[in-house]
Amino acid sequence: MRKPALLALSTAVLALVGTAVWLIWFRDTIPKLEPDPSVQYTPPADAPSTAAPGEWPQWRGPNRNSTSLESDWSSTWPADGPPKLWRAQIGAGYAAVAVSKGKLYALGNADGKDTLRCLDAETGKEVWTLSHPERLESGGYPGPRATPTVDAGRVYTLSLGGELRCVDAEKGTLLWSHHLVKEVKAKLPQWGAASSPLIEGNLVIVFGGGKAEVAAFEKTSGKLAWTALEEPGGYASPVAFTHQGQRALGVLTGRTLVALDFTHGTELFRQTFKNGNEINASDPIFAEGQVFVANGYNGKSALLQLGAGAPAVVWENQELMIHFNTAVRHEGYLYGTSGQVNASGGAFKCIDWKTGAVAWSKENLFASALRAGNRLVLLERNGALVVAEASPKAYKELARAQVLGGECWTMPVLANGRIYVRNKTGELVCLDVRAAK
């Protein structure tokens, strides 16, 4: 190599190193945000929360369990699929949409900015937008991963770089924001922040990583209530459940299932659960005093019995190795995809909750899922929309249509007789599945 070229390469390397050092210095010189002792946890009036049919205000639906409360919708479609009511470009990313009070909230990235969009859920007409600087990629995958959460007239978002924002749902104005890396010294995982904000009483909770794996803020003022855990960051979202008669927070880090109390973030129990990559991205499912956990990368799934002490393993196998899209639980069975979304193969399976035994398996069907009544709505990774029976007897397909192109890793949303689907590049489509009157 000639000297000028070697000199140029050396200069470039030094510049990169200098930038990295400056970023670390910048992060570490910003004063750490400390918990405010005036913030006291106020439990929700009713737990779990309920919502009217047509509401999908957060990740995985009104009760954060991948279940729609709607029953009056149709899976009898024309040959080319349900009518397309409107399309919109929302920016790159993997975040699902939230629907509340006739408005749709979508998050995406373009031109070096994350943009939160409020659209009319029926017409797709833009109501307002709000943008802020944010990098496009982390680990080669573009845009935000976390779904907006709508609560009491506010929208909460988390960028892949770790900025938590609270926005007025009607006006689109920023009410407060905090940066997990800069202010609470979180160390985000390889592919960035991915946890969709959880509202519990007067708190909003998100995951970071490192010395602040979990951070809880007062949802109205933005004051920090507490941080907890020092763990490798995970990609699952926080889940609220009842444990031993009290409200608890379920946290799946890169290598551990942990339960915390909401008052101070005090640890209630922990159970090691990891694969060789220390990557957990599927939410834990709590039901009947038990919890189901699963991961991918040649990982495993397990059912754990909860009690006064450490969880006990009920069963453990490799029948449902979930990369990231959380399974759906219905009448004692789990429905979900086993395999890697960015690899060939994969199978959509029905698993017995109590035993882990496979009731049926549909090979080469890789999809995210929600349930509405006794039907499953599936979005395949290639953009095919499928409706199937939610039954352990057999896989029975009721409808199928190609509704979107590109890479589709985001779960569909069903709200007010409309199904919303998006792809990685930010194409959002609204489909009419209202039952005929």
Image: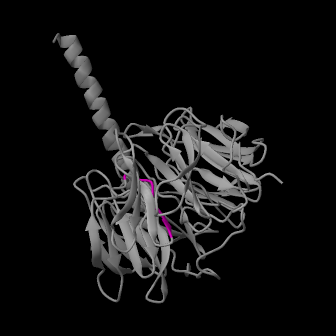
Q: Quadrant of residue 130?
A: top right
Q: Position of residue 84 (x, y in %)?
A: 71, 38
Q: How is the image coloured?
A: one colour
Quadrant into which the C terminus falls:
bottom right
Q: Is residue 316 above or below residue 296?
A: below
Q: Is residue 5 above or below residue 341?
A: above
Which of 129/397 is in front?
397
User: Is 100 positioned to the left or the right of 383 in the image?
Assistant: right
Mainly helix, strand or loop, the magenta region? Answer: loop
Residue at image location 31% in from the left, 43% down from the top: 21
User: Is 334 positioned to the left or the right of 385 in the image?
Assistant: left
Judge whether residue 359 can be spotted in this image.
Answer: yes
Q: Residue furthest top?
A: 2
Q: Quadrant of residue 154?
A: bottom right
Total numbered labels = 0
Q: Quadrant of residue 49?
A: bottom right
User: Is 335 positioned to the left or the right of 343 in the image?
Assistant: right
Q: Position of residue 29 (x, y in %)?
A: 39, 54
Q: Position of residue 250 (x, y in %)?
A: 43, 72
Q: Residue furthest right?
A: 437
Judge whether residue 114 can be spotted in this image.
Answer: no
Quadrant into which the N terminus falls:
top left
Is 197 a magenta residue? Answer: no
Residue at image location 44% in from the left, 52% down from the top: 193
Which of 428/209 is in front?
428
Query: Which range is magenta?
Result: 323-330
Q: Residue furthest front?
A: 393
Which of 18/194 is in front?
194
Q: Is residue 437 above or below residue 351?
A: above
Q: Position of residue 124 (x, y in %)?
A: 75, 42
Residue at image location 77% in from the left, 47% down from the top: 122
